[in-house]
Image (spheres, coloured by chain):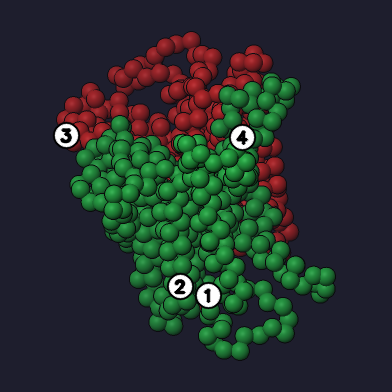
Chain colours: A green, B red
Amino acid sequence: MTAMTPAGDFRTSYRADMALFPTRNTRLAVLLGLALLALLPLPSVARQYLENGGGLAQSYDDFLALFDIGRYGLGLLIQIGFLGIAALGLNILVGFTGQISIGHAAFFGVGAFSSAWLHEHGLPVLVCIPLAGVMTTVVGIVFGLPAARLKGLYLAIATLAAQFIIEDFFARAQWFTGGVAGRGTEPPALLGFSFDREETYFYVVLVAVVLMFAAAANLMRTRDGRALIAVRDHYLSAEMMGINLAYYRTLSFGIASFYAGIGGALYAHYLQFVSVEAFNIGFSIQFLGMVIIGGLGSISGSLMGAAFMVVLPEVVQLGADAIAGGPVDQALKLGANISFLRDMVVGAVIILFLVFEPDGLAHRWRLTKAYWKLYPYSH
Amino acid sequence: MDWNLLLPLLLNGFIVGALYGVVAMSFVLIYKASQVVNFAQGEFLLVGAWVCWYFLTEWHLPFWAGFLFTMVFMTLFGIILQVVVLRPLIGEPVISVIMATIGLGIFFQALMKWIFGVFARPFPPIFAAERVELLGLQVQPVYLMSLAISVVIMAAFAWFFTASKHGLAMRATAFDQQVAQSLGISVPKVFAMSWAISALVSSVAGVVVGVVNGVSSALSFYGIKVFPAVILGGLDSVVGAVLGGIIVGLLENVAQYVDAEWLHIGNMYAIAPFYALILILLVKPYGLFGTKNIERV
């Protein structure tokens, strides 16, 4: 994470260099952003209240409609939230430790099924979610132990094998996953209040995102976090400095699995149904795509990548709808093949990012910020 | 032991394994020449098979002509992929290159589904005879053709790498790029050539499988089955790839037999190679014939 500071602007203390928020304004901006996010579902709630005979004037409704992003918009944000958490886990593994995993969706699935399974055994959902993270960590470490000796391409292939083995396990373990029928589950509840709609579930995800991202940002400021980065940058030197390679590679796998498990659990209680087929290799590749598009080794980038991957199919769909019925649409038979078009766009976007913007969206964001900070004297 | 069941399974495993061997060989070719792990190898089979299918059923070409056109097309396809996508990524970290080939894989998989649909389509019949007798077993002639083609390709590879000028240039590049360059070998050309040959050979395998089972997106799964094979044989060994392919083919069928007779777990056919893969990585990560990578600081 190389922060771009203008020339002459030096940090004078170690403390300032390690600070989460370099200035007071950045902290304010983050808090303000969070507050705005927390307000997002309110117009929708208020409008429903009005519709149900709150008895206020139509003009209020029109005014609120301006800020209402609707269930659909909130649903997208929720998706970005839980996918972003899982992507952050993968980023800690790939971007910060330099290990690769092509089986992240399988661990995401382990989290989803664990949480649903625990809930069926009588635990409240809000306890199930962290426990599912722990269970996924255990599974992750089991597969991470062979990974501790491997790196690069061998690890890629080992995790590919893990993906297929876990997927096969899902299809077989009826007691755990419900087999081909899948497993239904319930939304979380707290003191009798059920988070069963987008407007309320949004807050569950928001809290989880804040907690998980803050934890990751803090992890990177500790000895363990720096050890992970050292393993990535030059593992031989790291080992010579007394960093236990096997331990940190396994640890990184465990952390990545924990994040995947939490993301998966949030996914399970959002959809309230977990299907065995959902966690295939294509989903794993999507996670890798998020990390690469967002920016390897960037915490905020993970969220940007997840947002990109969630919004991209919607944009493709919108584009296809816009030309629906036209000659292009007729010639390409877009309506029936839209899912293939989406896949193609995902593949193409991954390649384009790798060739033209290998540092991802996070880097582009830093450049944009630097540009405006130094405007108009950029040199 | 039920030999009447096991023997055909073993024969099937050997024939399919030989095809895995061919695909694994073309995977190793790319890895050796340009250190790129190609996760889109299966899509080479897929594209080749669909293109050949198109020539045969839409243009009504005879089999040999369609086959020839497919080979020309795939050669160009391989070169274009290398030049347009992989060349800009030379020198990037291994993860980026892996991701780029994965991206290619998704792209072409989706494109083929879009153009040709998701259902398997059969090739027009090529052989008149339904079955031939071999060692007391009834065998489809397409299987024999597949085995013959695999053997021919393997022989061609052996000749190419030991006797032809280009093959020697490729081996020199794999050994040391800088030295090869100073001897007047154009390294970019060698890279492009390795992709062209790899695409070509894979597409031959794709056509063979297509003739046997019909063409569908399931073909790209061969690209994943390649990994147990190459890891078993050693990533940078052509001989190892062939052996690894055959062993994986046999293993699949033996696993299916064991499962059907005693274990009754189901789905062992598809999953056994991956268990084997994890075991090999734990015990002997450089495979049977791979070079042991000794690191010096």
Residue type at mark 2: give it.
Asn
Q: Which mark is residue A20?
A: 1
Q: Tell me whether circle 2 and circle 4 mark residues in contact (CB < 8 Å).
A: no
In the rendered image, residue A172, in percent from the top left (x then y), is placed at 26, 38
Instruction: Identify the element where label 3 is drawn.
Output: helix
Q: Would you place residue A310 above or below residue B116 in this image? A: below
Identify the residue shown where x is 69% and y is 83%: A9
Residue located beneath label 2 in the image: A218
Residue located beneath label 4 in the image: A317
Identify the residue shown where x is 36% and y is 59%: A258
Q: Would you place residue A90 above or below residue A344 in this image? A: below
Query: Is the same chain shared between marks 1 and 3?
Result: no
Circle 4 Cα neighbour tier, 10 Å, few/some/many (<14 / 14–19 / ≥20): some
- Separation of residues labelled 2 and 4 (CA atoms): 38 Å
- Separation of residues labelled 1 and 3 (CA atoms): 59 Å
Identify the residue shown where x is 56% and y is 54%: A305
Identify the residue shown where x is 54% and y is 67%: A31
Q: Quadrant of the C terminus of chain A?
A: bottom right
Residue positioned most to the bottom:
A12
